[in-house]
Amino acid sequence: MPPEPSVAFAPGRVNLIGEHTDYNHGLALPFAIAEGVTVRASAARAGWIYAHARDLGEQDRFAIADPQPCEGWRAFVRGAVAELTGAGVTLAGARLDISGQVPSGSGLSSSAALEVALCMALIALSGGPTLERMQIARLCSRVENEWVGANTGLLDQIASLYGAADTALCIDFRTLSVQPVALALEGWRLAVLDSGERHAHASSGYNQRRAECARACELLGIGSLRDAREAQIAELPEPLRSRAAHVLAENRRVRDAVAALAARDMAALGELLNASHASLRDLYEVSTPAVEATVQRMRAVGATGARIVGGGFGGSVLGLFAPGAQPPPGAREVRPGAGAHLLGR
Ligand code: GLA
């Protein structure tokens, strides 16, 4: 009997605050959103994967035993299959039907949604034991690092896997602890506005930023920027000093944001979002003119706080709006929603 088909949904994410901290063993505060990627996996000819990217109208076909590197969405599918096999998941043969609502390159982590949904659907189809969520997160991150060529951290995968309604996740990337933080908006709204500028982490300045942080650690003789002290970083040459200064301050802002949410002080949260944006623009230098114009559109209609979300170099801007304030035309409201899960068959 062929195994029953499986269907998995994995959400994209919005990072409330804590940007470019994950690969520096720092802190971040993301939440999963309602939009995501759905993968339906059904049994197919043994030894083969047939994939259909429904939104693009494109197909792929490859042997499980020999998934060659490839570009675009196919890299994610081939990487997921290869990494799952490497992790001991026995895949017979599968037909994968992929569809989603997170625009690629919009800073809302369509990549993680795709990787996570692929892995969950394939693991369920295999009928073998399921993997721990953190194991899936790490495996998906390897897909991105080794198959897609983006040296991203674990932020997006953890947000997609651990998300829950009305909850942000305070992640400590040193210990990989994930603490739920109540995100009770009480009439306040969060909205994202697309800058229209697309990015691909593999080809943007993302990998370069990561390399700069690694170089800063090397010069300071520390394992990660989490261990850097203000006095030490003053000794670094530019632009490494600015990069490190962003990371240290951004970790503090995550702690302050958790405190602001606990105190239900949304105005303070808005100030933190603005400070994060200024730091990402001036110290980390991941903003662009299109992103700045988008931030201005958010502020012009009265956003209490607005900042670029995700890796930068394009993508979306997050805005926080007080009760009564209207997000600008084209903005989409986002709320913290459920993490990745299997759907009924
Ligand atoms: C991208 C990466 C994440 C993280 C953010 C920046 O979304 O995938 O790992 O580094 O950028 O915070």
Image (tube, helix red, strand yellow):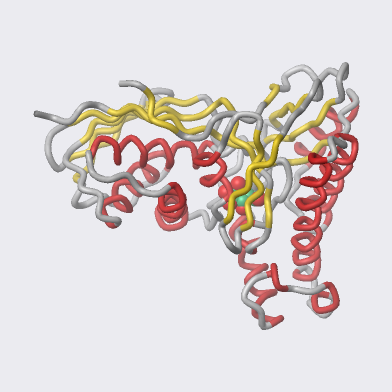
Image vertical order of residue 320 relative to residue 89, above or below? above
Name the image quarter holding residue 342.
Answer: top left
49 w.r.t. 342: above or below: below
Q: What x and y, as percent, mark residue 53?
A: 37, 28
Which residue in the rendered view is the most extreme toward the left?
1
Residue visible at 70% across and 22% down in the picture? 333
Question: What's the residue at 84%, 28% (across, down)?
Answer: 297
Residue 112, percent from left and from top: 50, 42
Left or right, 70 with reference to 219: left
The quadrant in which residue 153 appears is: bottom right
Q: Nearer the viewer, residue 40 or 173?
A: 173
Residue 232, placed above or below residue 53:
below
**Residue 123 in picture, x, y percent from top left:** 30, 41
Q: Quadrant of the N terminus?
A: top left
Q: Nearer the viewer, residue 180 or 288?
A: 180
Q: Quadrant of the C terminus?
A: top left
Say which residue appears at 43% left-offset and 32% top-offset: 341
For the point 69% across and 68% down, the residue is: 226
Total residue callouts: 0
Q: Is residue 24 above or below residue 233?
A: above
Residue 246 appears in which quarter of the rendering? Answer: bottom right
